[in-house]
């Protein structure tokens, strides 16, 4: 069972439909017990960092997320859900992140005619062959982004793939059983679906 964590800020139904294409049993839930009993979990997210952390705290979901990770079960953070896995964000006025990854979420600089937010299709570069989420994914594959902030991991070994937009940034982060993708795999057609299939097949 894959728990899709519902804290009021995610594109949850399209994520659920994509996972179900590969035979995954899913539950959309805001209950800590469902997250802890699941085999895997997805933390989606669209919106602001402060608001998201407030909702996770209000619903008592943070201990459940930490418990799932401690129990060595796979967790996938998508877009804002990936950013929440870091210690802090330049977008946040108050909230700290979940601190699964060390590092900060930073805002793109609007310079050299670079448009912010970064919206549209872009390439994955420097793909890690060791990251199981990227099985059968080639460097240069296109995925769909929509974000103004990007994660900057302190440990560069945690970067499983990068993307270039004004600068090279972490498009995928990976540490043990925790994965984060800055793009939207559920909107990224064949490549995104292959990544979600890889997540479904993780042991």
Image (tube, grey):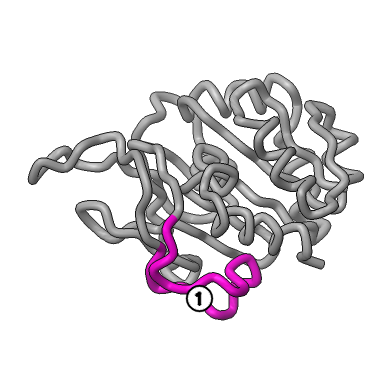
Residue 7 in sight here: yes
Q: Residue at x 63, y 54 (%)?
A: 193
Residue 66 in sight here: no
* Residue carrying label 1: 128
Q: Is residue 6 left or right of residue 156?
A: right
Above or below — where is 174 with respect to 109? below
The quadrant of the rendering that contains the C terminus is bottom right
Above or below — where is 187 with respect to 126? above
Q: Residue at x 73, y 34 (%)?
A: 5
The picture places residue 141, in percent across and down from the top left corner, at: 44, 64
Magenta segment includes 134: yes
Q: Residue at x 33, y 36 (%)?
A: 148
The picture places residue 120, in percent across and down from the top left corner, at: 36, 43
The picture places residue 165, in percent across and down from the top left corner, at: 26, 52
Q: Nearer the viewer, residue 152 or 42?
A: 42
The furthest residue to the front: 190
Q: Nearer the viewer, residue 43 or 84?
A: 43
Q: Which residues are magenta?
A: 124-142
Magenta segment includes 158: no
In the picture, residue 142 is in which quadrant? Answer: bottom left
Q: Secondary structure at mark 1?
A: loop
In the picture, residue 58 is in which quadrant? Answer: top right
Q: Is residue 43 left or right of residue 119?
A: right
Magenta span: predominant SS is loop
Q: How many marks?
A: 1
Q: Is residue 196 left or right of residue 122?
A: right
Circle 1: is it few (<14), some (14-19), or many (20+) Cα within 10 Å?
A: many
């Amino acid at each position: 069972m894959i728990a899709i964590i519902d804290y009021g800020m995610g594109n949850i139904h399209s994520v659920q439909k994509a996972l179900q294409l590969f035979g995954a049993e899913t539950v959309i839930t805001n209950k800590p017990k469902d997250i802890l009993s699941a085999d895997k979990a997805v933390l989606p997210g669209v919106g602001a960092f402060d608001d998201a952390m407030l909702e996770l705290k209000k619903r008592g979901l943070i201990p459940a997320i930490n418990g799932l990770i401690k129990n060595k079960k796979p967790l996938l953070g998508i877009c804002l859900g990936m950013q929440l896995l870091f210690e802090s964000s330049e977008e946040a006025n108050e909230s700290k992140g979940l601190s699964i990854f060390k590092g900060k979420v930073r805002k793109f600089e609007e310079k050299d005619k670079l448009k912010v937010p970064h919206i549209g299709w872009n390439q994955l570069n420097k793909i890690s062959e060791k990251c199981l989420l990227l099985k059968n994914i080639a460097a240069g594959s296109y995925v769909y982004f929509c974000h103004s902030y990007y994660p900057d991991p302190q440990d560069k070994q945690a970067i499983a793939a990068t993307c270039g937009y004004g600068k090279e940034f972490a498009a995928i982060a990976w540490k043990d059983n925790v994965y984060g993708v800055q793009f939207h795999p559920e909107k990224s057609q064949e490549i995104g679906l292959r990544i979600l299939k890889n997540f479904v097949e993780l042991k």
